[in-house]
Image: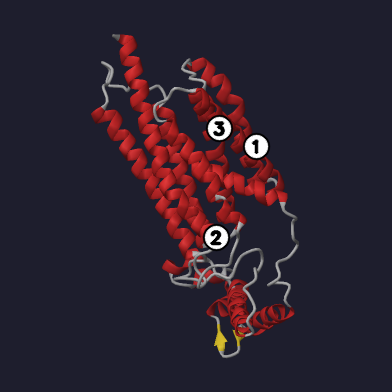
Amino acid sequence: MVDHLSVALLFGLLFLLPVLEASPGDADPLYRACVEQCEKTGCIMQRCFPACEFSSNALSSNGSWYMHEPLYLQWKQWDCLSDCRYYCMIDREIERAALGEAPVKYHGKWPFTRVFGVQEPVSVAVSVLNLAMHFQGWLSFIILLWYKLPQKLDKTSYYEYTTLWHIYALLSMNSWFWSAVFHSRDVDLTEKLDYSSAVALLGFSLLLAIIRSFNIRIEATRVMIAAPLLAFVMTHILYLNFYQMDYGWNMQVCVTMAVLQLLIWAVWAGVSNHPSKWKLWTVVIGGGLAMLLEIYDFPPYKGYADAHALWHATTVPLTCLWWSFIRSDAKYRTSQLLKKTK
């Protein structure tokens, strides 16, 4: 829960801030002049870029410049403009540092240092780590259900929310996978996949919060609740991908779904006698405190780790605790159902 909830809360914080047309870095005349000159010549000082050569040759070969690169390098799709912007940014930041000036953002992003073509290596690493934590949590959940808890005669689990948590795990891992890809290379396709995955996870998490907190076990009732919510989520995803990538509207949708599920979990934890509700409170409060890293935004240390990367890092232990709560809930509900059966 903490990962997608934090993402939506971040959207909410950003929504309250004024929208800027340009970042200070890309508004710098020296940076603009460098990029313009680089696009014309393919070089910055004595440093020239193969991508710019590919770009000019592509006109005669009816192919994109990156199709001329080796296959293992084609995924990153660094074109001439991207390379020019990156190296002009790096040179400009070196000049600013020599003058004692602080780093600034370029095109909405801090000046990160690439590692093997990866745009934000630390954010990619912690995204992969979060994915691994969800996989480990899901695997431990499966082992608990199959090998440690009693099962019905038909070898199915007594726990009524098993299937929902399986779907949640798959959506979580999918979301963190595309987060890692997006931080590796920010292009239109990876942005849409990252946003769509986050929206899908948020929508399903809200559905799960409603079903679990209200203890809805009748299948027909679940379908009646799920149908309109999932229809809205799918429509929103299609809108973002095939009509308009409306960042403002997407923020409002994400914040609304996140706040609703936060309230549902908080109220349920307050009125429930669940033995592990302290874990739920810890995740909710810890996720909120972790958001302070996003409020206190700072440039990447040594060009690698910024506030956003550290925020993602804080979700790793919280994710472990969240899956611990899920396992505790499975034990708790199973014991209750067995008592009723006896």
Q: Secondary structure at mark 1?
A: helix
Q: Give the answer, above or below, for where 311 lies relative to 239.
A: below
- The picture quadrant where one finds residue 226 is top right
**Residue drawn at (58%, 41%), measured in percent from left and top?**
199
Left or right: residue 173 versus residue 10 is: left
Residue contact between numbered discs 1 and 3, judged by CB atoms under 8 Å: no
Q: Does the rendering let one see residue 319?
A: yes
Q: Secondary structure at mark 3?
A: helix
Residue contact between numbered discs 3 and 2, judged by CB atoms under 8 Å: no
- The picture quadrant where one finds residue 81 is bottom right
* Residue hosting label 2: 307
Q: Does the rendering let one see residue 158?
A: no
Specify the amino acid type for callout 3.
Leu
**What label does residue 203 carry, if any?**
none
Q: Give the answer, above or below, for where 22 lies relative to 206.
A: below
**What label does residue 256 carry, if any?**
1
**Residue drawn at (49%, 18%), measured in percent from left and top?**
216
Residue density around tag 1, few if under 14, some if 14–19, many if 20 or more, within 10 Å: some
